[in-house]
Amino acid sequence: MADTDFHALYSLAGRTALVTGASRGIGAAIARILGQMGADVAINHLADAAAAAQVADDLRARGRRAAVFDVDVARRDVAAALVAPAVAELGPIDVLVVSAARSVYATLEEARDEDIDAQIETNFKATVRLLNAVVPAMAQRGFGRVVTIGSIVQEAPLPVLPIYGAMKAAHLALIRAEAVRWAARGVTFNNVSPGLIRTERNAWRRAPGGDWDAFARSCSFAGRAGEPEEVACAVAMFCAPGASFVTGENLFVAGGAQIPGRRSAPGGSGGD
């Protein structure tokens, strides 16, 4: 690998990627950056056709093939409903990025059974089903990249997201186990855990009267929120052919929020 061209180490030309939850925010940024790396991209979304179509148009403008699939990943038949049609249209899946997620803000005693079940199905069971649908074929071909999107709350829990945080922690344990199983077959498994990222999901904090500025300053040592493209950059590294010896890792993209310690104003020392 020492003589390999730098661009080849990051090229996904001729590869196909499937990105779940890819119509907006982090998922859309990931789909776009994988397209820039040369991949054709299957864009999964849930009832967000216009936004997903825009991502697909952006990819096609760069010369990539793109296909859009409106499928709830929590379906038990997600392999037949999403993976099989994606393979039929774009070819075998070489890169899987699990970005779709569902969170319900409630303390443990407030959480309804249906909300708990929805988070377990979307944030954990869906990943199990997707891995079963794509990984064995990756291993047969000797190449595969799986990246799951975790969360800062798996390291720094929030009392109003106990089920979500628990599922993200379980998610990480799952992909580390799979990393051990498939490492010798050319398939890598890694997790990217964002902190506060500016997305549509938290747009309500930026509405008039919202607390976005103060909230963003308090959420990391960087004193700001991250951008979807910053998460996508980390995902791109894990997906690159040159990252073939990196597996079972968790990478925080959180402005240092995962580091214990008292936070001060941006640029401050943190001392008195």
Image (cartoon, rainbow, N blue to C red):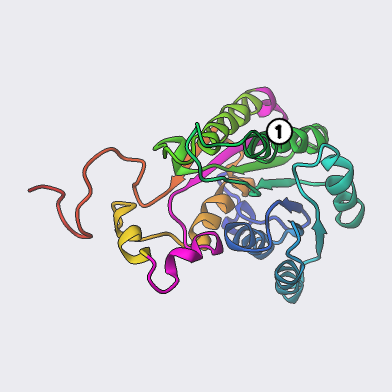
- Residue 131: % across, % down: 74, 35
Work out whether 75 lies above or below 18.
above
Q: Nearer the viewer, residue 44 or 248?
A: 44
Q: SS for tag 1?
A: helix
- Residue 181: % across, % down: 68, 23
Q: In the rendered image, which quarter contains the N terminus?
A: top right
Q: Nearer the viewer, residue 234 or 117?
A: 117
Q: Residue furthest bottom?
A: 61
- Residue 236: % across, % down: 58, 53
Q: Mark 1 packing: few (<14 Cα in 10 Å), some, or many (20+)? A: some
Q: Which residues are magenta?
A: 181-210
State which quadrant residue 178 falls in.
top right
Q: Residue furthest left?
A: 272
What amino acid type is highlighted by mark number 1? Lys
- Residue 149: % across, % down: 58, 45
Name the residue that disc number 1 marks: 125
Q: Nearer the viewer, residue 166 or 109?
A: 109
Image side of residue 79 versus residue 116, left or right: right
Q: Residue furthest right?
A: 88
Image side of residue 93 versus residue 150, left or right: right
Image side of residue 90 versus residue 36, left or right: right
Work out whether 260 lies above or below 71.
above
Name the residue at 50% across, 37% down: 250
Q: Nearer the viewer, residue 105 or 226?
A: 105
